[in-house]
Amino acid sequence: MKIARVFPRKTTATPTDDLAFFGNPPDGIEVDEVHISVTFSYDTDIAAELYESWKNVAPIVKIGGPAMGATGGEFTPGLYLKNGYVMTSRGCPNNCWFCDVHDREGGIRELPITTGWNLLDSNILACSDSHVRKVFQMLKTAPRPRGQTIQLTGGLEAKILTRYHVSLLWDLRPGQMFFAYDTPDDLEPLIEAGIKLRYANFTRSHLRCYVLIGWPKDTIRAAEKRLIQAWTAGFMPMAMLWKNKKGDTDKEWARFVRQWARPVIAKSLLKELYQSTVHA
């Protein structure tokens, strides 16, 4: 079956094969189904326009994806994400105010394990030890392009990171693993995770930390403080700008995030901020 997948915008994870499209359908296209995949809530209007453009291309044309509240089923490599990206579980036991994963997917559901080298699970460490072990073994042995390292992009929760998990990570040796500092109670577990991971010889070149910024009543100064805290805990902080469902972005916060978008600039900013804090 030929399925055209249509996306409102291109990201690093978007498929690039001949049946992945952006914008209006090309002349003469013949497919069995059209799936319009919407990841971000602020793209729903664009998705509606795409539906109008594609509705007569195939007998079945439908809109889905996380932004439409769709609960994901089993993961099919290469269908809605580029080959190499993989998901082995859905859902999350947490119910954070800024995240819709729990509302949309519910608690953790372990999926059949397919292959890839970039793991996007929302909370892989919340899965059973047996599943985590099998997933890490898959990542270790899955074919990947020459020079491509294993990536744990979906996120690791510091609060539930154990020494057993660290031993698995030490054996896996991912090029990058991502944690998060979203709320004040994330800081202490992040510090503890940093200690455990540094003991296993992981450095900031491996350890990344998404730091949520820019929500209502947040301030630039408070955001800078959290970024420094993530840095001192042993992680390379990555500012992640909160957006409402419409995708509205305050200009000051957008400018602030751009400053932190490039690691070289971010490191320079961190050193300056750290020095000013020390000498204050």
Image (cartoon, helix red, strand yellow):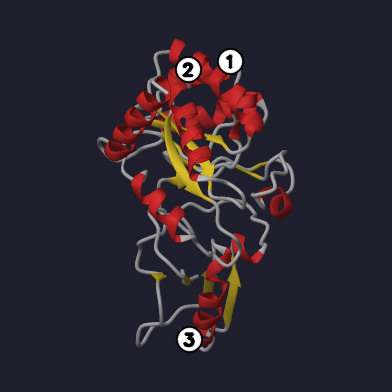
Query: Do the CB atoms of the residues marked 1 and 3 lie less than 8 Å apart?
Result: no
* Residue 116, numbered label: none
Instruction: Tell me which amino acid carries mark 3.
Output: Ser
Reply above or below: 19 against 168.
Answer: below
Coordinates of residue 3 in the picture (x, y in percent): 49, 71
Coordinates of residue 32 in the picture (x, y in percent): 51, 77
Q: Disc 3 or 2, which lies upstream in sequence?
A: 3
Disc 3 from disc 2: Cα separation = 50 Å
Please name the residue shown 40% across and 82% down the image. Answer: 25
Instruction: Tell me which amino acid carries mark 1.
Output: Tyr
Kindly indicate the quadrant of the structure image that contains residue 238.
top left
Q: Which residue is labeled 2 in the image?
A: 197
Q: Residues within 10 Å of mark 3 (few under 14, many from 20)?
A: few
Q: Which residue is labeled 3 in the image?
A: 53
Instruction: Tell me which amino acid carries mark 2.
Output: Leu
Q: Which residue is labeled 1 in the image?
A: 164
Q: Disc 1 or 3, which lies upstream in sequence?
A: 3
Kindly indicate the quadrant of the structure image that contains residue 191.
top right
182 to the left or right of 253:
right
Residue 173 appears in view: yes
Please name the residue shown 29% across and 33% down the image. Answer: 268
Disc 1 from disc 2: Cα separation = 11 Å
Coordinates of residue 9 in the picture (x, y in percent): 43, 67
